[in-house]
Amino acid sequence: MEPQEEARTPGESLSRPPGASGSPTPDEEERPEGSDAQGAAPAGAEGDSAGADGLWGLPVEHAERRPECSRCSRPQKVCLCPYLPVHPLQISTHLYIIQHPAEESKVLRTVPLLAACLPPDKCTVKVGRRFSEERDVELSTVCRNSGTLILYPGAEATNLEEFILDSPVYPSTIILIDGTWSQAKDIFYKNSLFRHPKQVQLKTNICSQYVIRMQPTSRCLSTLECAAAALSILEKNNSIHETLLRPLQALCSFQLQHGAQIRFSKEYLLKNGLYPKPMPKNKRKLRKMELLINSVKI
């Protein structure tokens, strides 16, 4: 059983235990068994060692982080605010995003762009992997509300458009999980809180426009794209989809103009014999690869 991690809101950093280090120092690294560090030094190494030791005394120049735009969270030189709506979109649905901690440090993440398009009281981002009713009272209340949905595809999920036609209570909140597919799966299945909301999925043939990150298939959407599709359905306003996608399109366009390459989906690479890695030996992973190759037509 994995230890629980305390959830936090973006901006809160995890403190490191006193004396902890991110990587081992040269003295801490393991040496080959049976070797003698002093006896193994080649002739003339003393002089080289003395010169190298002198480098440790030089001052360390810390790279300064580029100033970021306070609204879109992009570096100021590549600010995407011109592509954001002048005023936050007026919506009635509350978007609740569960973000895997690894997403916080990614430069090309989409959640800051999504949040910048919405009113602050309509978009909540909660960072963490494990949540409990006792520690996360607010999230527990949200999950137990009859008007809350969670967007996660699967055999038990109902198509969102069909659900809102038959539901006696119109949804007021929708939960999205932000992370890679394996991270999202881990969060969804290992937190009992997420069994309470009604599980829904998007029935769409839209291909992802987030072409600078690899997806399992071209129909796997980024968090921003999922939110855009879901909100346009729940708010019954198709213009929301176009407005939310505009900054994502600008981000991808800028990156492609400055050296980034289009990242084809894993499905596309496998079907066309372009996948650069050897096929996995693990039977479960190999089966997943075979399904990508055989089950969906491009």
Image (spheres, grey):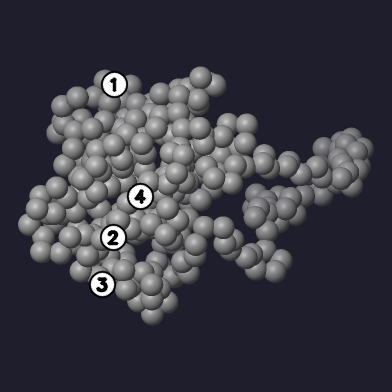
Q: Is residue 27 left or right of residue 246?
A: right
Indicate the quadrant containing the N terminus: top left, top right, bottom left or bottom right: bottom left
Q: Position of residue 154 (x, y in %)?
A: 18, 51
The residue beneath circle 1 is 273
Q: Which circle's residue, 3 or 2, is located before the other in the chain?
A: 3
Q: Which circle's residue, 1 or 2, is located before the other in the chain?
A: 2
Q: Amino acid at mark 1?
A: Gly
Q: Amino acid at mark 4?
A: Gln
Q: Which circle's residue, 4 or 2, is located before the other in the chain?
A: 4
Q: Tell me, for residue 90, which label it has, or none.
A: 4
Q: Nearer the viewer, residue 44 or 272?
A: 272
Q: Position of residue 86 (x, y in %)?
A: 46, 39
The residue beneath circle 3 is 144
Q: Residues within 10 Å of mark 3 (few under 14, many from 20)?
A: some
- Hey, which quadrant is residue 188 in on the image? bottom left
Q: Position of residue 82 (x, y in %)?
A: 50, 32
Question: Residues under labels 1 and 2: Cα distance?
Answer: 42 Å
Q: Which circle's residue, 1 or 4, is located before the other in the chain?
A: 4
Question: Residues under labels 3 and 1: Cα distance?
Answer: 47 Å
Q: In the image, what residue occupies the spot 24% across and 49% down? A: 235
